[in-house]
Amino acid sequence: MPAPLPPAIDGLAPEALPPYPGLALADVTLVADAAAASAAAALLLAADAIGFDSESKPTFAKGEASTGPHLVQLATDDHAWLFPTAVAAGLPVLKAVLESTHVQKIGFGLGNDRSALQSRFGIALANVLDLGERLRGPGHRGTVGAKTAVARFFGQRLQKSKRIGTSNWAAARLSERQMLYAANDAHVALRVYRAWLRVPV
């Protein structure tokens, strides 16, 4: 079993770390039709593990129920696919990949994803690893977030814009900043997982 977290980076405040580069827009595909969904399925189902996350349009009114997830992100080692859940052509692929017992899904803070995908789309997640739980060690209360993991494993600062994170993920047209934010949420989980497996016990 791999060790939880490598040693902390001594003497460097998080803001002093170099930025985590992440995926470029050229390595991100928005799945907008059946052809894109089919191409994504072939690569995702051939992977041993993929990064996984989802985004929902925020709710602001008291008692308002979320209608998300509105976007599901899946990533291989070198590419990410964004599946707007309003695009019906992508839903069978999401179901096939997320329910596959052969492909491990890796993410951070996946507690709500399981119930939301099941209730909205009838997708029963299988073979899922929540790094937020698995990386937790004696020195960590609660779950470990992606920012902490990136600092520990790569010595870099993961920049996450709160404004983008709480933007409208149900929009008919996502901005480039939204696409990069969403893609890297999934991709960074897979990168951390690969690095975690290399940590000696």
Image: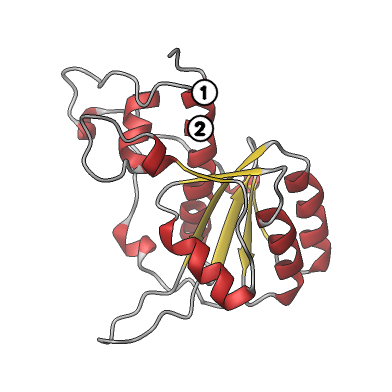
Q: Secondary structure at mark 2?
A: helix
Between marks 2 and 1, how big is the CA–CA gap? 6 Å
Which residue is outermost to the top? 200
Crowding at dot 2, Cα within 10 Å, few <14 / some 14-19 / many 20+, comes out as many
Q: Does residue 175 show up?
A: no
User: Which picture quadrant has residue 95?
Assistant: bottom right
Query: Tag on residue 197?
Result: 1
Q: Does residue 67 show up?
A: yes
Amino acid found under the numbered disc labelled 1: Leu
Crowding at dot 1, Cα within 10 Å, few <14 / some 14-19 / many 20+, comes out as few
Q: Secondary structure at mark 1?
A: helix
Residue 117 pos. (x, y %):
56, 68
Label 2 sits on residue: 193
Amino acid found under the numbered disc labelled 2: Tyr
The colour style of the image is secondary structure
* Residue drawn at the location 29% of the way across and 31% of the way down: 137
Closer to us: 130 or 152: 130
Closer to us: 191 or 160: 191
**Image check: 85 left or right of 110?**
right
Residue 79 vertical position relative to residue 111 in the rendered view, above or below: above
Residue 189 vertical position relative to residue 63 in the rendered view, above or below: above
Q: Is the residue under label 1 in contact with that under label 2 (CB below 8 Å)?
A: yes
* Residue drawn at the location 25% of the way across and 86% of the way down: 62
Residue 140 pos. (x, y %):
23, 36
Residue 159 pos. (x, y %):
34, 44
